[in-house]
Image (tube, grey):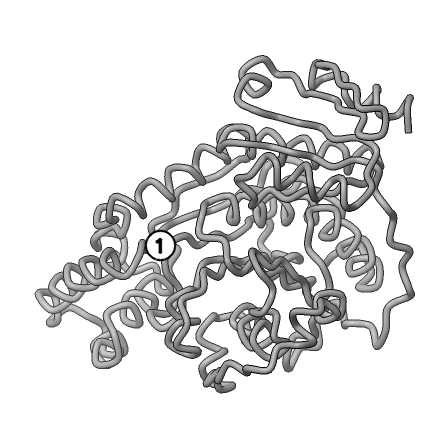
């Protein structure tokens, strides 16, 4: 049982999520491109379709919100969150969605945000389980091998698994995994069938986990419904102070990519990755108190894979110090980020390039005074606290 109330979970959670660049749907809908969008996308997602995420449709529901609110009219990546009430249980939940980002920074951003959310909710002892099913080619190869493996053992398959084979090999495997059946433990590993692009994508996520010193485990048993998930999937496990895994997981966190699902339901190729956090046994409040949204004076700018990860960790450090920031970690344009910082009238830009990444430093640029200096990254929080 969690000690945090559902109101505090959602209130602190929203503040944390916003720090990492996620916005509410209402904010994004006010974008002129959304308001003036005349062409609706025919999203064919039914209630049954949504539930293939294993999360009551709270993850796949991001697609219906994305197209239904015409957020697809926005140029570039779209990051948004929704507060949820879990069907049947009434538990409070938060869903985070990233559309239009194919690169691994999307998973890194979701995992880091969820780690911050877990810490704020009173669960600092946690680890991440992660796996990848790969892209369409990878899934096709893996499915073929898994199907052959299970068919050769049809005589020893439990009756329920044999019946589920008629639906899909994944369905049968998920049943075997739930039973902790030896057949599941000896089944083919999806990571062995990844295409080169999927292997690179997964390796980059692992590099983020290593760089951020995130406790993690590559778990080949972490799979999802064949009509929903593709590429990376992740889940959180909570532990007590003695590093024992909690028998009851009061904060339930799952996430993954589902671009194939989005394409099947909308006919459009849009990269999509989402994550859901459920506070179990805590009823969602009927309303949340109005929260004051801070106006940051700092914009974190980065360029390159390593600098993106370093910047993500810096953003979290600034959050812990109570310093709000703007950022656009999905951008690969230095000039574009600096232009955005100027348009937002932020006073300072913190710039992390390849040199700064190697030197463990950051460029502190005063955009009003048009001056800059190099500062050790270990001292940037104290420096900002003096000048803000």
Q: In this view, does 40 lie to the left or right of 122?
A: left
Res 285 seen here: yes
- Residue 131's place in the image compared with 144, above or below, is above
Q: Quadrant of residue 342?
A: top right
Residue 111 percent across, percent down from the top left: 57, 46
Residue at 34%, 66% in the rendered image:
174
Residue 253 percent across, percent down from the top left: 58, 57
Q: Which of 21 and 206 is in front in this view?
A: 21
Q: Which of 215 and 143 is in front in this view?
A: 143
- Residue occupied by mark 1: 221
Residue at 11%, 71% in the rendered image:
155
Residue 216 percent across, percent down from the top left: 48, 39
Residue at 66%, 27% in the rendered image:
351
Question: Badge 1, how many Cα within 10 Å: few under 14, some, many 20+?
Answer: many
Q: Quadrant of residue 380?
A: top right
The C terminus, quarter of image: top right
Considering the numbered disc 1 on the image, is that residue within a helix, a strand or a loop? loop
The N terminus, quarter of image: bottom right
Q: Is residue 103 left or right of residue 367?
A: left
Q: Is residue 20 left or right of residue 205?
A: right
Residue at 31%, 72% in the rendered image:
171
- Residue 382's place in the image compared with 40, above or below, is above
Q: Nearer the viewer, residue 235 or 228?
A: 228
Q: Which of 347 and 68 is in front in this view?
A: 347
Residue 154 percent across, percent down from the top left: 12, 71
Q: In this view, does 319 lie to the left or right of 212?
A: right
Q: Quadrant of residue 206?
A: top left
């Amino acid at each position: 049982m969690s000690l945090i109330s559902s109101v505090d979970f959602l209130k602190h959670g929203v503040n944390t999520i916003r720090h990492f660049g996620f916005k509410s749907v209402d904010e994004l809908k006010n974008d002129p491109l959304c308001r003036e969008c005349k062409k609706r996308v025919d999203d064919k997602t039914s209630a049954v379709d949504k539930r293939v995420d294993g999360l009551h449709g709270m993850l796949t529901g991001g697609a219906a919100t994305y197209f239904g609110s015409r957020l697809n009219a926005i140029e570039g990546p779209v990051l948004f969150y929704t507060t949820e009430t879990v069907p049947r249980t009434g538990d409070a939940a938060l869903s985070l969605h990233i559309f239009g980002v194919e690169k691994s920074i999307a998973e890194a951003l979701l995992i880091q945000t969820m780690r911050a959310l877990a810490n704020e909710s009173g669960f600092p002892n946690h680890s991440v389980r992660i796996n990848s099913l790969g892209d369409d080619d990878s899934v096709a190869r893996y499915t073929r091998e898994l199907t052959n493996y299970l068919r050769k053992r049809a005589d020893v398959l439990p009756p329920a698994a044999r019946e589920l084979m008629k639906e899909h090999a994944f369905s049968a495997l998920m049943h075997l995994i739930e039973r902790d059946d030896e057949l599941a433990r000896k089944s083919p590993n999806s990571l062995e069938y990844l295409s080169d692009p999927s292997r690179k994508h997964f390796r980059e996520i692992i590099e983020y986990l290593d760089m951020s010193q995130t406790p993690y485990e590559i778990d080949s048993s972490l799979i999802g419904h064949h009509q929903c998930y593709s590429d990376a999937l992740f889940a959180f496990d909570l532990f007590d102070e003695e590093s024992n895994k909690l028998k009851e997981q009061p904060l339930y966190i799952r996430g993954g990519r589902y671009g194939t699902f989005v394409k099947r339901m909308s006919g459009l190729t849009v990269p999509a990755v989402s994550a859901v956090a459920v506070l179990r046994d805590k009823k969602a409040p009927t309303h949340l108190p109005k929260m004051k949204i801070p106006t940051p004076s700092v914009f974190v700018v980065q360029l390159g894979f390593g600098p993106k990860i370093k910047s993500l960790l810096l953003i979290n450090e600034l959050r812990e110090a109570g310093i709000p920031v703007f950022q656009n970690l999905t951008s690969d344009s230095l000039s574009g980020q600096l232009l955005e910082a100027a348009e937002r009238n932020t006073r300072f830009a913190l710039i992390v390039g390849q040199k700064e990444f190697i030197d463990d430093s950051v460029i502190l640029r005063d955009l009003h005074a048009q001056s800059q200096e190099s500062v050790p990254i270990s001292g940037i929080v104290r420096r900002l606290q003096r000048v803000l």
